[in-house]
Image (spheres, rainbow, N blue to C red):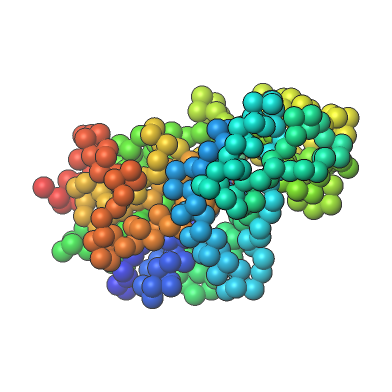
Amino acid sequence: MNYDFLVVGQGITGSIVALQLKKNSKKFKLIDGGSPNTSSKVAAGIVHPVSLKRCNLSWRGREFYEFSDSFYKEINFESNTEIYKPHKLIRVFASFEEQNNWIGKTNNEIYKNILSLNNKELHNLNDRFGSGIVELCSRLSVNEFLDFVRDSFLKSKYLIKNVFKAEELQLKNNRFHYKGDTYSNIIMCEGVNALKNPMFNYLPLIPNKGELLKVFSTILPSEIINCGIFSLPETKNIFTIGSTYSNKDLNPNISEDAKENLMKKLTKIIDIDDIEIMDQKFGFRPTSLDRKPFVGEHPIIKNLYTVNGMGSKAILMAPLLVRELLDYIYHKKPLDSMINISRFSKKINDENIDYAKSLGLP
Ligand SMILES: Cc1cc2nc3c(=O)[nH]c(=O)nc-3n(C[C@H](O)[C@H](O)[C@H](O)COP(=O)(O)OP(=O)(O)OC[C@H]3O[C@@H](n4cnc5c(N)ncnc54)[C@H](O)[C@@H]3O)c2cc1C
């Protein structure tokens, strides 16, 4: 069979690619190896356009938020569920300095409808410096979203449950051949697994380990709370607490250190006696050296593309970044130079060149 696209990886990014290809009536296959501990499978699902640490609008924040908000609302409609819902996020200030900074921002036009001051006291929490609200915030139930995409594409036979092996790919007459089918284009969305693949492993992708706790608490509030870490309400008295960030710990296991670190931060705002830990999870975020995503076409192998390096903002950024890649593929609309992988073309190495040669390229 002939297809327009092969999409590799059904994490948040690959799922969004597949949904947009379907909307554009393209013929494609989506392939996923079903790794259990992917970043997408543990992601908390929070979407907002603010960098909370610096109390700044994040890079292209409002533009990404507006695009992703309407994208996920359409998925709600198609799936007849509320996979995506608006939520208020409350930032508990750690100092008067932070409080003053936040107040300053609420008077600035750029932050209109995004930041406000919380005038209510937070019961049972230590909020002696007060708190602010991120008004433009939502949550995607990521696992429900991934399940929806998997189930609908399995039903229509668009999804193959298998590991993609780069060494089994062939290129003949400008078309990719893989396991008996041919494809005009390939889009790689492998997350941190891209480091094992000679196609794009020259890109400076850095796995950043994140761990989360599932806890029982009778006093954590029903809003999303952020105090350096976040508390996310799940079901009655059950909360997700996260996340840690580490690019040094590459062990594929949960760690005592992360548990202690999360509990220490949580006890700055709440009495520890109330908390009972029920579970702990980890995943590796695909982050990049310059903190910008990787989007674009392979420097040697034409019609081979990637969307990766989403860091901790895949849910916010992926819908618009995928749209921009598809506009580049369909209409040759130039990509933003900040995201275009052409910025790393000089990093291509012998292994990548040998791989391109193995496909028959000069
Ligand atoms: C603890 C934690 C909390 C987070 N919270 C948030 C949050 O609140 N909001 C947010 O926006 N982001 C969050 N993130 C970041 C987010 O999870 C990532 O940015 C995002 O999941 C990256 O998605 P991806 O699809 O690019 O990669 P991945 O999630 O890694 O998905 C890659 C997929 O490709 C498949 N795959 C890989 N190689 C192959 C192959 N060769 N063949 C077949 N299949 C393959 C894998 O099985 C996987 O399904 C969090 C991350 C962590 C770790």
Residue 207 to residue 77: above or below? above
> Is residue 237 or residue 117 the one in the foreground?
117
Q: Residue at x 77, y 26 (%)?
A: 268
66 with respect to 336 (left or right): right
Residue 120: horizontal and vertical position, in percent?
80, 43
Residue 336: horizontal and vertical position, in percent?
31, 49
> Is residue 32 shown to the viewer in this render?
no
> Is residue 56 shown to the viewer in this render?
yes
> Is residue 193 or residue 18 the one in the foreground?
18
> Is residue 115 or residue 207 the one in the foreground?
115
Number of labels in the image equals 0
Q: Quadrant of residue 172?
A: bottom left
State the quadrant of the N terminus: bottom left
Residue 47: horizontal and vertical position, in percent?
58, 50
231 with respect to 101 (left or right): right
Q: Residue at x 25, y 43 (%)?
A: 342
219 with respect to 169 (left or right): right
Q: Residue at x 27, y 38 (%)?
A: 344
Residue 4 to residue 65: above or below? below
267 with respect to 67 (left or right): right
Residue 308: horizontal and vertical position, in percent?
41, 47
> Is residue 79 or residue 231 the one in the foreground?
231
